[in-house]
Image: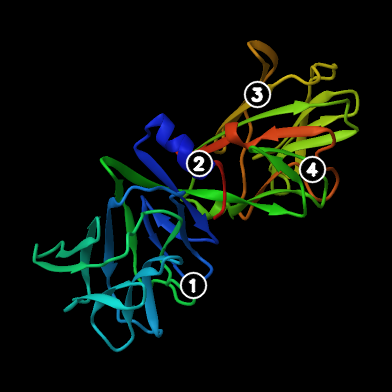
């Protein structure tokens, strides 16, 4: 059982997070721009519950122009939902042998596909959300199918073809046993080089070994509020250590020689240089958990609070702040100048919210 799935079940949360692989277009929870490299990845861990349900809302607004159009898939065991070029049929394919074929898709329509599985019995219901018309197909398989492993929204099982239409996560869900999970998309992280990651804590950070989020700020709908929270420790006095940064001339939070805290940011009134604020005193206690909360309002202000336990190490406010587009979010480096010397960043307690919606929650891109 994966750590994420075990944690999810232990907390009895009713939200399951899918990570954005590559780059997708989102409009209030409705996703488009799917391709073999751009899709939603969902890690359901490993479980032994043989009763589950999948419900997906999608549009069929244009004909299939490639060989296949993949809506939902699992690699092993093989399970996928797709449309084949030249056909007007949505196919639910089980282990490449059993096809539960849903016919008569109508261009320009929105649909819901609901798949219920229980102890070898399959029920597939396709509903036209405009007309309310439903088509039902059933099947029985001798194999036991668990809702587990990696699922992908917007691509085929082979990963060769994307979904030409939209998928609405707002009204899609998974149900495992008696627990129903709403779906929400977040970006994941990718590992660059070879930093050390143990139980979600990353160390060995350098200019060539670091963490990079798999999407960019400008690919999220125009933001007004940005909240960054992270947790780290310093094992010994660093020569320089970048905790996180956003692009060039935007944000950099780091520790400099002497254990000083530095916050560099982009001012709307001076867009071509980083403004620098510093504590100018040695305030970072070694081998202690340090929390950072940065709350920003676009083109207005940034409020940074750094704590060791309940002790506030730094409370800084800037009233001239902004972020421009096309920005990578990096943890443990700024690539050009510094790495994460003697730094341990806890990804389990790192998250980013954009416009009060969770955007990153410490997950790796599946």
Q: Is mark 3 on a helix, strand or loop?
A: strand
Q: Mark 4 points at which residue?
A: 205
Q: Which residue is drawn at 41% across and 53% down?
A: 148
Q: Which badge, 1 or 3, is on the more N-terminal residue? A: 1
Give the vertical position of 143 relative to 293 (above or below): below
Instruction: Give the CA distance from mark 4 to mark 3.
Output: 18 Å
- Expressed as whole percent of the image width and height from the top left, the position of residue 3 reads 53, 40
Circle nearer the viewer, 2 or 3:
2
Circle nearer the viewer, 4 or 2:
2
Q: Which badge, 4 or 1, is on the more N-terminal residue? A: 1
Question: Which residue is at the far front?
Answer: 142
Circle nearer the viewer, 4 or 3:
4
Instruction: Give the CA distance from mark 1 to mark 3.
Output: 39 Å
Question: Which residue is at the far top?
Answer: 311
Q: Which badge, 1 or 2, is on the more N-terminal residue? A: 2
Query: Which corner quadrant of the image does residue 63 belong to?
Result: bottom left
Q: Residue at x 41, y 84 (%)?
A: 66
Q: Is mark 1 on a helix, strand or loop?
A: loop
Circle nearer the viewer, 1 or 3:
1
Instruction: Give the CA distance from mark 1 to mark 2.
Output: 24 Å
- Expressed as whole percent of the image width and height from the top left, the position of residue 56 reads 28, 58
Q: Name the residue under label 3.
A: 291
Task: Determine which of the numbered discs, if any, sits on residue 159 in the image.
Answer: 1
Give the vertical position of 313 relative to 76 (above or below): above
- Between 91 and 253, the one lying in front of the other is 91
Task: Determine which of the numbered discs, if any, sits on residue 4 in the image.
Answer: 2
- Expressed as whole percent of the image width and height from the top left, the position of residue 65 reads 38, 84
Q: Which badge, 4 or 3, is on the more N-terminal residue? A: 4
């Amino acid at each position: 059982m994966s750590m994420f799935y075990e944690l999810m079940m232990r907390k009895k949360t009713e939200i399951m997070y899918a990570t954005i692989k590559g780059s997708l277009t989102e409009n209030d929870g409705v996703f488009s721009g799917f391709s073999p490299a751009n899709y939603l990845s969902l890690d359901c861990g490993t479980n032994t519950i043989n009763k589950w349900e999948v419900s997906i809302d999608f549009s069929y607004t244009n004909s299939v122009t490639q060989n296949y159009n993949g809506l939902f898939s699992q690699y092993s065991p093989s399970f996928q939902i797709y449309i084949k070029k030249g056909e007007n049929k949505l196919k639910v394919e089980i282990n490449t042998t059993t096809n539960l074929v849903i016919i008569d898709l109508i261009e320009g329509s929105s649909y819901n596909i609901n798949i219920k599985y229980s102890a070898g019995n399959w029920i597939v219901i396709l509903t036209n959300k405009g007309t309310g018309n439903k088509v039902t197909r059933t099947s029985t398989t001798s194999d036991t199918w668990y809702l587990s492993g990696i699922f992908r929204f917007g691509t085929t099982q082979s990963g060769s073809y994307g979904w030409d239409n939209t998928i609405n996560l707002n009204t899609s869900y998974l149900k495992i046993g008696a627990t129903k999970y709403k779906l929400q998309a977040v970006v994941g992280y990718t590992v660059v080089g070879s930093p050390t990651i143990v139980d979600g804590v990353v160390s060995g950070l350098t200019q060539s070994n670091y963490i990079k989020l798999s999407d960019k700020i400008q690919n999220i709908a125009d933001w007004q509020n940005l909240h960054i929270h992270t947790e780290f420790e310093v094992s010994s006095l660093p020569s320089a250590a970048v905790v996180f940064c956003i692009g060039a001339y935007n944000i950099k939070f780091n520790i400099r020689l002497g254990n000083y805290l530095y916050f560099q940011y982009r001012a709307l009134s001076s867009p071509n240089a980083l403004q620098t604020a510093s504590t100018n005193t040695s305030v970072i206690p070694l081998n202690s958990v340090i929390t950072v909360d940065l709350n920003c309002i676009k083109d207005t202000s940034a409020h940074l609070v750094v704590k060791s336990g309940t002790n506030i190490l730094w409370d800084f406010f800037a009233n001239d702040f902004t972020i421009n587009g096309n920005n990578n979010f990096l943890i443990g480096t700024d690539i050009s100048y510094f790495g994460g010397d003697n730094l341990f960043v806890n990804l389990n307690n790192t998250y980013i919210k954009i416009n009060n919606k969770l955007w990153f929650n410490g997950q790796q891109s599946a």
